[in-house]
Amino acid sequence: MAIDVKSTAPAPVRRLSRKDLQSGEPDRKVPFLARWRRDYPLLIMVAPAVIVLMLFTYIPLLGNVIAFMDYVPFLGIRDSEWVGFDNFTALFADAGFWNAFSNTLQVTALQLILFFPVPIMLAVFLNSVMRSGVKKFTQSVIYLPHFLSWVIIVALFQQMFGGAGVVNRFLINNGISPLDIMSNPETFKLLITFQGIWKDAGWGTIIFLAAIAAIDASQYEAAAIDGAGSFKRFWHVTLPGMRPIIVLMLILRLGDSLTVGFEQILLQRDAVGPGAAEVLDTFVYFNGVVDGNWGAATAAGLLKGVVSLVLVLAANKFAHKLGEDGIYKS
């Protein structure tokens, strides 16, 4: 039997035209002017935010050079003496710095243990509320403290738990010894932690409620058909669906962990003394702005930033090992 050579020969390859390449090539580089004409409305919209970010975030980072100088404001950066790492050496020999660092770590640990889980639990609770009216009212109530200043919140706590507050007046009228809550150095860290929970826990539920809303409802239906109760649906559906957001927020919280509330602590510092209330932010303020020791104060701030960066990178690396993206993919 004869074999038709023409029928078995491969079809000739058609050369793609320029139009085909432009329509089907995903990685084709678009010229700058073409991208500008296409995207200039969006660029104009984000320009104010970028300018503000540059002026108040990135350009001030250049001021960290003061950490390596004996900075005198009247001389400026150019004429101040360069001292290298002397400010860091003096900082590490300062007992006040280590007291502030220890207090900061203790407050951070309390906030991670007591504060961080509260918005998650509140979000799960609000999601389980079936009546829309009750949910909206509850959300409004727990969001409200976020918009109050720390001056108002500290005053409210003073009126409630201070020496002449409502709680102590009630205890005294009933023959019970009053409680020293607002001026007790031993419980001060717990006090500021619970103040933070009361102020911001409700506001923190917003992102977790959004994470729960993004979970496919069919997963809950399938779990219910399989006989899963409310706890098992939470454990096997809700919690895994929230896990990427929980990991992301935990990483961001670790990056901001050494910032534990400057205004809140400054307002109550005199009541308990610097031994219990001095943290890195107040240490920088009193050493730099008040005492004029700008070099050591900047060195403390720079050290705080470096530690925060290391915590973020380490936490993000650990998140990758757990199979999560974190704040960026590896």
Image (cartoon, rainbow, N blue to C red):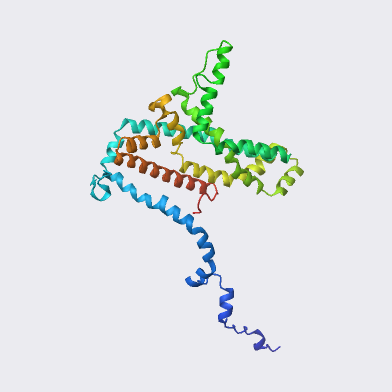
Residue 86 location (% of width, % of height):
25, 41
Q: Residue furthest right?
A: 225
> Does 102 sit above or below residue 14?
above
Residue 142 location (% of width, % of height):
61, 36
Query: Residue 72 falls in which quadrant of the image?
Result: top left
> Does 79 sit above or below residue 181?
below
Residue name at image x 57 percent, y 43 percent: 246
Is residue 281 in sight in this rendering? yes
Residue name at image x 69 percent, y 37 percent: 231
> Does 98 sit above or below residue 24?
above
Number of numbered labels in the structure image:
0
Q: Nearer the viewer, residue 310 or 253?
A: 253
Residue name at image x 65 percent, y 88 percent: 6
Q: Residue furthest top?
A: 175
Is residue 31 in sight in this rendering? no
Residue 144 location (% of width, % of height):
59, 37
In the image, 4: left or right of 156?
Answer: right
The N terminus appears in which quarter of the rendering? Answer: bottom right
Residue 154 location (% of width, % of height):
50, 30
In the image, 228: left or right of 256?
Answer: right
In the image, 275: left or right of 15?
Answer: left
In the image, 96: left or right of 116?
Answer: left
Q: Nearer the viewer, residue 273 or 248?
A: 273
Residue name at image x 27 percent, y 48 percent: 76
